[in-house]
Amino acid sequence: MFSKFYQKFSKDIGIDLGTANTLVYVKGKGIVINEPSVVAINQRTKQILAIGNEARRMVGRTPPHIVATRPLVDGVISDFEVTESMLRYFIDKVHVQTYSFLRRPRVVIGIPSGVTEVEKRAVVDAALNAGASEAFLIEEPMAAAIGSRLPVQEPSGCMIVDIGGGTTEIAVISLGGIVISKSLRVAGDEMNQNIIQYARENFNLLLGERSAEDVKISVGSAFALREPLSAQMRGRDLVSGLPKEVVINDSQAREALMHSLKVIINNIKAVIEEIPPELISDIMHRGIVLAGGGSLLRGLDKLVQEAAKMPITVAEDPLTCVVRGAGVVVEDLETLREVLVPAEFGKIPR
């Protein structure tokens, strides 16, 4: 009786704990936080100086003793203590107006489909230590499919490709479970590295990560464009050591990105080859859904369609698909419990 009373007032939350961005959905309110997964730390005092948007502004602009770092690499926790602090910051931000007698929130967190039991445990422990009463895990492709309004609980096949910052998740879903999945450590961050490498090899230009991401957003594409695009790249000349500015066009950016895009396309085709015949007929009818920030790359849907020979749809607001899916589960946790990752360690010790 009391737990039902507390549940009414507790702000249970869904979290997309991404390599690039963390999004938070609050039960009954919707998405309330969308901030970069970046933490600024003073190395001398081990004090956390900034988290989220404020920390991202410091990237590449700090003195040696201050480090702006991302505590998640390729979708998994690389620094447990910093991740815990970041989660506590976001949970506290949500509960800033909640009275202390109300129970701690239940949390549903999206994780990549290929993580190990140890990595799952790390996410759960970080959430519990950050202030959650219970922590549930949902695989990101499942959350993205739910957020894209695919009928995941029906006996028919759905295929989703979620291209995030650290990982690309490819999955076929039916009857509330993942039938086939692949998790690649090739996604948005790797594409940024492709542009940095291209600038180094072709222009003798040393480019920063943020600059490379700006180029990717400005002129990046996966398929030939009708109208040419160009952008300025500013960095350091590797020969003279002086500042240098060059112009890159969409064709050059596409050449740079093609290495990562080929890996993603080849893995999509590999998953399609494994799909049972009954499910592939459903997917041919419904098509493949693209989600995540990487799906916003110009012409990516055309490139995948040409390779997979079936219809391609880009999800509505692909950046928030995973957190919206986690939010749907948070709103009706008892009914949708079957889509969560089974775990024996999701409750806080009493």
Image (spheres, grey):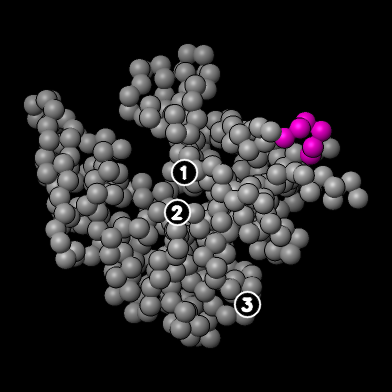
Disc 2 target residue: 319
Q: Give the residue at x 67% y 51%.
A: 28
Q: Secondary structure at mark 2?
A: helix
In primary-sequence order, the first of circles 1 and 2 is 1
* In this view, 284 is above or below 131: below
The quadrant the C terminus occupies is top right
Please indicate whether residue 138 sits to the left or right of residue 220 in the image.
Answer: right
Is any atom of residue 303 visible in this view? yes
Return the x and y of residue 35 as percentages of the image width and height: 48, 39
Return the x and y of residue 86 as percentages of the image width and height: 56, 33
Disc 3 target residue: 154
Circle 2/circle 3 CB separation < 8 Å: no
Is any atom of residue 84 visible in this view? no
Return the x and y of residue 76 as percentages of the image width and height: 52, 45
Find the distance from the CA under tag 1 to the CA under tag 2. Answer: 9 Å
Range covered by the magenta-colored residues: 98-103
Q: Secondary structure at mark 1?
A: strand
Which residue, as the protein is rendered here, is positioned at the far top?
Answer: 44
Whether residue 238 appears in magenta in the rendering, the answer is no
Three-letter code, disc 2: Leu
